[in-house]
Image (cartoon, rainbow, N blue to C red):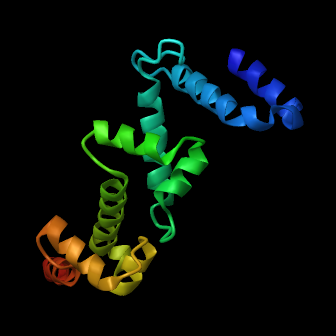
Amino acid sequence: MLLTTYTGALLSQQEAIGSLAPLAFEHIADFIAAAVGLVGATPSGSGEDVPGGRLAAILRELERSAADPDFSLPALARRLAVTPRYVQRLLAKEGTSFRDELTTTRLNRARSMILSPNSDHRSITEIATHCGFSSLPHFHRMFRRAFGETPGGLRARVFRLREP
């Protein structure tokens, strides 16, 4: 109820909030983290698991936007009304980085598409582009590093297994 009241007040006085908008968004994010029932989630007053809620939001937004080749750390931070450095710190606590998470998400999508019979008609280049890679050689290097074979090698192996 507090979240609804707070949000309503902010929306009705948009001109008045001006420079307070980032703080208001931070408070709303804190309320949402507590409201979704995260284990131990508390508002920013104690701040114990608000970062957990924000980390979940970061990962959801990353998953949602990974296919955009122009998606970047500053864009992610802007969408979530936090600083890029804050995103970096949260991901570093998890032993990862924005670049690692983005690449992993894109590679997993590409692998799923290569393995899917619904994508048989798509070229490897189309799949790479669809998953957000703008450089085919980079995609091949990263794919081989992650999965131990090239995208074309995986596709050929899967086709051989599907043949009667």
Q: State the residue at coordinates (28%, 47%).
A: 96
Q: Residue furthest left?
A: 148
Residue 78 versus residue 133: which sits nearer the camera? 78
Which quadrant is the C terminus positioned in?
bottom left
Quick check: can you spot residue 96?
A: yes
Residue 1 versus residue 153: which sits nearer the camera? 1
On the picture, is 160 further left or further right than 6? Answer: left
Q: Position of residue 76 (x, y in %)?
A: 52, 52
Using the rendered view, name the quadrant where residue 108 is placed. bottom left
Q: Position of residue 38 (x, y in %)?
A: 44, 22
Residue 66 vs 149, above or below: the answer is above
Which quadrant is the N terminus positioned in?
top right
Q: Residue furthest front?
A: 19
Residue 134 versus residue 149: which sits nearer the camera? 134
Q: Position of residue 111 (x, y in %)?
A: 28, 68
Q: Position of residue 118 (x, y in %)?
A: 38, 75
Using the rendered view, name the quadrant where residue 131 is placed. bottom left
Q: State the residue at coordinates (49%, 15%).
A: 42
Residue 35 vs 74, above or below: the answer is above
Residue 122 versus residue 150: which sits nearer the camera? 150
Number of on-image labels: 0
On the picture, is 93 further left or further right than 73? Answer: left
Quick check: can you spot residue 164?
A: no
Q: State the residue at coordinates (32%, 62%).
A: 103
On the picture, is 27 further left or further right than 141? Answer: right
